Amino acid sequence: MRLGIKTDDEFLIKLNEKNIQIQNNFLEKIKEIAKKHSVNVMLQDGAVKKQETFDVEKIHQIYSDISERLETWTLEGISSTNDEGIRRNFIKLNINPGDHIISLHLSIQYHVVLFYQPNYKVMKKQKELSDFMDKTKKQEYELTEKTDQVILEKLRAGGYKKFDAQNLFEILYKDDKIREKIMNETELQTDGDLQKINQHKENLLKALDDLLLETYQMEPILIDEARLVTGEEGCVCNIDIERIENDQKSGLIDSKKMSASTKEKISALIDQVLTAIT
């Protein structure tokens, strides 16, 4: 059972009241780290502007402090995800009071907006890349044509008469000898120029990537896990209590079936969380 769900169970009602305090305390901490400040950023065209962001690294300190205070709990890990500009930093802990398990999940989700650092090197590298692309465009096309011709000749010489894009991939994947011959001949015919062009292009692109500046956007509000999964900004603070029976977890909790000592342990552990997040 997830705390916060409406119930008529008096014991769980008391836990829900504590859960509200825990969530409010966590939200206040998130509001504090989500305070925005301005930084200088550079746009693609070289223009410099102010952009609001917040210090996302502070969440790691919050998680570390909480896990240290909950020293008897098992830390499942402090982790991060990265999906198309949406990041999530979360921590999970659990503890077993008798035949029950209590799980704590804290998470923040925010958007990442990329800019360039306000650095002259950005414009310099952009121009270098643009000039290089213009200079090598014709040469790259000619080398690609030559490479394609080498592939066709070697495949036909190897006994492959009919092939399309799909089985071409399969041939090169399965036939090590023909693949090696093609690579060697391509290198010989093009003097390795195509690889050199691609490598230099990759180096320039990497140099530009190294000059990127991440800024972060988050609305400091409490959201549920359904909204978290859909990519909304915000924070999650959930406590789940489950009963373990025959090595199986069950979220159906009836405090009337709990012993007094189990209730006392669970209540004390929820108090621990409240203290840790205060």
Image (cartoon, helix red, strand yellow):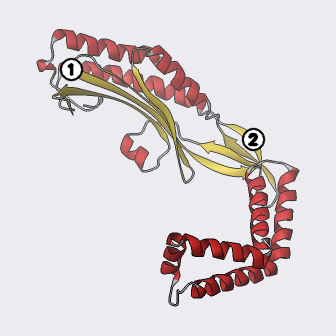
Quadrant assignment, res 130 = bottom right
Distance between the alpha carbons at the discs numbered 2 and 1: 52 Å
Quadrant assignment, res 12 = top left
Q: Position of residue 4 (x, y in %)?
A: 30, 30
Q: Residue sitting at 24 percent across and 10 percent down?
A: 264
Q: Residue sitting at 46 percent across and 23 percent down?
A: 25
Looking at marks 2 and 1 on the same chain, the residue that comes earlier in the sequence is marked by 2
Q: Secondary structure at mark 2?
A: strand
Q: Residue furthest left?
A: 257
Q: Do tag 2 and tag 1 residues touch (Cβ < 8 Å)?
A: no
Q: Secondary structure at mark 1?
A: loop
- In the rendered image, the quadrant that contains the N terminus is top left
Q: Nearer the viewer, residue 165 or 180?
A: 180
Q: Position of residue 263 (x, y in %)?
A: 22, 14
Q: Is residue 153 shown to the viewer in this render?
A: yes
Q: Is residue 210 above or below residue 200?
A: above
For disc 1, the marked residue is: 99
Category of crowding for the residue at label 1, using alpha-carbon neighbours closer than 10 angstroms: few (below 14), some (14–19), many (at least 20): some
Report the side of 69 relative to 45 (left or right). left
Q: Is residue 268 above or below residue 197?
A: above
Category of crowding for the residue at label 2, using alpha-carbon neighbours closer than 10 angstroms: few (below 14), some (14–19), many (at least 20): some
Q: How many numbered markers are drawn? A: 2
Q: Position of residue 174 (x, y in %)?
A: 50, 71
For disc 2, the marked residue is: 39
- Residue 77 is labelled as none
Q: Amino acid at mark 2?
A: Val
Q: Amino acid at mark 1?
A: Asp
Q: Residue sitting at 68 percent across and 42 percent down?
A: 52
Of circles 2 and 1, the one toward us is 1
Q: Residue furthest bottom?
A: 161
